[in-house]
Amino acid sequence: MALIQGGFEQVAKNEIVKAISDRTGFTQRQIKEILRLTFEAIITNLAVDGRVELRRFGVFELRQRKARICKNPTTGEILQIPERSVVVFKASSEMEHRVIGQIRPDSSSPGSRTKKNSAKKELEKD
């Protein structure tokens, strides 16, 4: 069951806070503070270590984009784009499977790996 019911609309942080508060009995103020501290910890550790891994959720990583030359398609002007750091997020395989509906939310990771490996073996047979 989804924490927040609805279609493909955007979900605001306040809606997540309210849904968690309703399910846990904590106040919305307490949930907001927990989320703030969680996000702050992710940002701080990403800035220091360049990588934050949240098992069964995904990995945030700091990567370097190389400097490059490109052309403005409208004006034809040649532009020099400098090297820069970017934050990337790679979802865990469990998250990807759950988001696209491949496994039930109550399934454990090892079971999903077994299904994935057996599907891979089936493909290799062909």
Image (cartoon, rainbow, N blue to C red):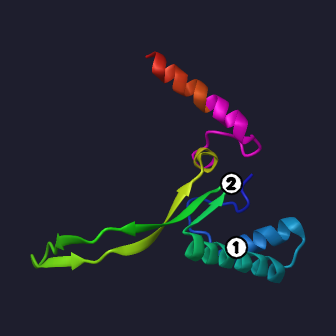
- On residue 82, which mark appears? none
Residue at image coords 32%, 74%: 83
Residue 21 in the image, given as x and y percentages of width and height: 82, 72
Q: Is residue 45 above or below residue 110?
A: below
Magenta residues? Answer: 98-115
Disc 1 target residue = 15
Callout in the foreground (1, 2): 2
Disc 2 target residue = 55
Residue 105 in the image, given as x and y percentages of width and height: 72, 46
Residue at image coords 54%, 69%: 50
Residue at image coords 86%, 79%: 27
Residue 53 in the image, given as x and y percentages of width and height: 63, 60
Q: Name, please, the residue furthest toward the left.
A: 76
Q: Is residue 19 magenta?
A: no
Q: Amino acid at mark 2?
A: Arg
Quarter occupied by the C terminus: top left
Q: Amino acid at mark 1?
A: Glu
Q: Is residue 112 magenta?
A: yes
Q: Within the image, what quadrant is residue 9 found in?
A: bottom right
Circle 1 — which element? helix
Front one among 63 and 87: 63
For the residues labelled 1 and 2, the Cα–Cα distance comes to: 24 Å
Circle 2 — which element? loop
Q: Is residue 96 above or below residue 19?
A: above
